[in-house]
Amino acid sequence: MLVGLERPDGGTIRIGGRDRSAPARGRAERLARAPEIQMVFQAPYLSLDPRVTVGRCVEEVLRLHFPMETTARQEHVAELLKQFGLGEREAAALPGKLSGGQRQRVAIARAPAAELRVLVPDEAVAALDVSIRAQVLELLGTIRREVGIGFLTRLTTPAHTCCSAPSPDAASVIGPHRDA
């Protein structure tokens, strides 16, 4: 419901004080909502275009949502990738040339490129080995602390490692179900 795939039977869904209960109508409204809520999927390879370099993939989020000069946008992409342990070599690579952990970091790096309020990781670490899983969970925790976003997730690993609310306002329990 939060990402607009289902409609609530009753009540409202609010993000940043705006009602998000009704589905977005048209491309313009979807683009206006997109920066607030981002999903990170369990299989990052399927969410990355195999024909587009990693740098361009992250840059596309910025290009769609924020008017900036090309140079500034590319600098921001390099900054984001560096924050997630990815350098120039990975930025120039196609997703198929990266490890599973690197692809998952790319998928996560795309999320804070937008003005994120809520991140919805869909079992984002389930398919990763234990050491890479720990790194990705640490990255999610860093995003939560530094960017101040809420999470709506179901993890197969302890959620306390990354997903407690950064402040009482970031995520809350409303009614009988957990909502963000």
Image (cartoon, rainbow, N blue to C red):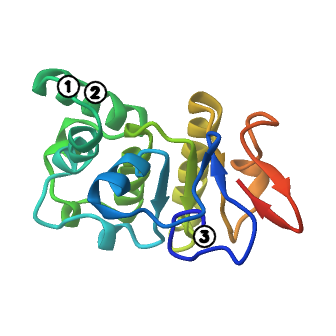
Q: In this view, does 59 lie above or below 177?
A: above
Q: Which of marks 1 and 2 is nearer the N terminus?
A: 1
Amino acid, disc 2: His
Q: What element carries label 1?
A: loop
**Residue in the image at 13% along x and 58% along y:** 52
Secondary structure at badge 3 equals loop
**Is residue 45 shown above or below 80?**
below
Q: Which amino acid does label 3 sit on?
A: Met
Q: Do the residues labelled 3 and 1 touch (CB within 8 Å)?
A: no
**Residue 50: image location, x then y, percent:** 17, 67
- Residue drawn where x is 42% and y is 45% of the image: 35
Query: How far apart, in angstroms, are the residues tagged by discs 1 and 2?
Result: 10 Å
Q: Nearer the viewer, residue 46 or 118?
A: 118
| Residue 87 in the image, given as x and y percentages of width and height | 26, 36
Sequence-first disc among 3 and 1: 3
Q: Which residue in the rendered view is the most extreme toward the right?
A: 176
Could you tell me which secondary element the residue under label 2 belongs to?
Answer: helix
Instruction: Name the residue rendered at 74%, 72% in the picture.
Output: 10
Disc 2 designates what residue? 76
Residue at the spot of label 3: 1
Residues under numbered marks 3 and 2 in contact, where contact means CB atoms less than 8 Å apart: no
